[in-house]
């Protein structure tokens, strides 16, 4: 067996389990040291799993996928790694079993929503499948909670827009009512406005290291779209030059602050998209046009919003009927 000297190091090349391995020593090794190093190399690769912790391979997975993932997705992956327990992060990948994965999911389920737990599993699973492909596992996730969309009322929207008029947040809220996402509101500029037609083609998102990153593309292909703004909102954009000067999160914090001040139910800027869909539907606008305006890929969200609106209308009608009956019986 040939020993090569490279600077201050000594190297031996050995084919182990079909792969060429370099065994490196700080000094000229003895026969016994070489045999021990070879045995250790076989042990490390006998399972087909490289040595290293889950966290090390999770970071490697991010690095491998970096060029095909959005900055916001990369940021969310780092957030997930920080949320995983030290016990699981520091576990050798070779030692991870189906039981260990389920135990980590069980721990996460105690303090996080079913959707958040599913997001964690959606990251843990592909990492293990990429670097430990022979491990077959099936994880039980917490049952998802029924989704009920929040749809602000006309009166709530009027109160909110009146309260925010003349502030730096007015345009952001009004663009939200036009079914724009926070990331789109923060990215759009007056250069994207041609007459009353606003072209939405980019988004401002939190990047991998926490700073803001301008994406030249939107969430989906259909998110790149043209919408019509009324003269007042178009004028605000021309005056302000940009949909919002600041972080997307600032919009949500200000929205919640004003909702609390006005005594109206809390909702997200994203829920203003639901308001747009419900309002447009009530006006008889076909779903295909509503989907185009909001950049929705499917009508799943629209149907949930419509069902919610229909349920509220039914309750209103039943309340009206109950009041009428009571008046007649008095």
Image: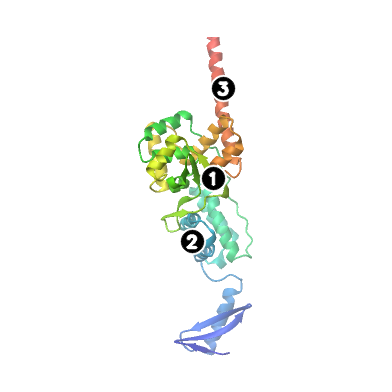
Closer to the N terminus: mark 1 or mark 2?
Answer: 2
Way the structure is coloured: rainbow
Mark 1 against mark 2, which lies toward the viewer? 1
Q: Which residue is mark 3?
A: 317
Q: x and y percent of residue 149 in the render? A: 53, 37
- Residue sticking out furthest to the left: 167
Q: Which residue is mark 2?
A: 87
| Residue drawn at (48%, 30%) of the image | 153
Circle 3 — which element? helix
Q: Residues within 10 Å of mark 3 (few under 14, many from 20)?
A: few
Please say if the residues under marks 2 and 3 sit with CB atoms less than 8 Å apart: no
Circle 2 — which element? helix
Looking at the image, residue 174 lies above or below residue 206:
above
Q: x and y percent of residue 27 in the render? A: 46, 87
Of 300 and 204, which appears nearest the observer?
Answer: 204
Of 262 and 158, which appears nearest the observer?
Answer: 158
Closer to the N terminus: mark 1 or mark 3?
Answer: 1
The quadrant of the rendering that contains the N terminus is bottom right
Please say if the residues under marks 1 and 2 sit with CB atoms less than 8 Å apart: no
The CA distance from mark 1 to mark 2 is 46 Å
Q: Is residue 215 visible?
A: yes
Mark 2 against mark 3, which lies toward the viewer? 3
The CA distance from mark 2 to mark 3 is 56 Å
Closer to the N terminus: mark 2 or mark 3?
Answer: 2
Q: x and y percent of residue 212 in the render? A: 42, 54
Q: How many marks?
A: 3
The CA distance from mark 1 to mark 3 is 37 Å
Q: x and y percent of residue 45 in the render? A: 59, 74
Q: Is residue 255 visible?
A: no
Quadrant of res 322: top right
Q: Which residue is mark 1?
A: 225
Give the left or right position of residue 211, taking residue 88 as reference.
Answer: left
């Amino acid at each position: 067996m040939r020993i090569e000297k490279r600077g201050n190091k000594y190297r031996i090349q050995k084919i182990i389990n079909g792969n060429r391995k370099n065994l490196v020593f700080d000094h000229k090794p003895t026969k016994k040291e070489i045999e021990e190093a070879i045995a250790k190399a076989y042990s490390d690769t006998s399972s087909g799993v490289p040595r290293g912790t889950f966290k090390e391979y999770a970071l490697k997975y991010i690095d491998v996928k970096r060029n095909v993932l959005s900055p916001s997705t990369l940021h969310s992956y780092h957030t997930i790694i920080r949320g995983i327990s030290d016990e699981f992060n520091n576990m050798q990948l070779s030692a991870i079993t189906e039981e260990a994965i389920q135990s980590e999911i069980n721990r996460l389920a105690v303090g996080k929503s079913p959707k958040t737990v599913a997001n964690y599993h959606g990251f843990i699973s592909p990492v293990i499948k990429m670097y430990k492909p022979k491990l077959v596992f099936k994880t039980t996730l917490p049952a998802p909670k029924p989704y009920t969309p929040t749809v602000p009322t006309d009166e709530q929207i009027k109160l909110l827009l009146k309260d925010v008029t003349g502030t730096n947040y007015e345009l952001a809220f009004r663009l939200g009512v036009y079914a724009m996402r926070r990331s789109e509101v923060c990215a759009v500029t007056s250069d994207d406005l041609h007459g009353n037609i606003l072209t939405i083609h980019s988004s401002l998102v939190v990047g991998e290291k926490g700073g803001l990153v301008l994406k030249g593309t939107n969430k989906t292909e259909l998110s790149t779209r043209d919408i019509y703004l009324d003269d007042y909102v178009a004028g605000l954009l021309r005056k302000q030059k940009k949909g919002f000067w600041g972080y997307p999160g600032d919009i949500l914090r200000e929205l919640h602050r004003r909702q609390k001040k006005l005594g109206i139910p809390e909702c997200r800027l994203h829920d203003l998209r639901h308001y747009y869909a419900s309002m447009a539907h009530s006006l008889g606008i076909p779903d295909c046009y509503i989907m185009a305006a909001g950049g929705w890929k499917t009508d799943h969200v629209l149907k949930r919003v419509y069902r919610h609106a229909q349920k509220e209308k039914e309750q209103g009608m039943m309340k009206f009927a109950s009041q009428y009956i009571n008046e007649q019986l008095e």
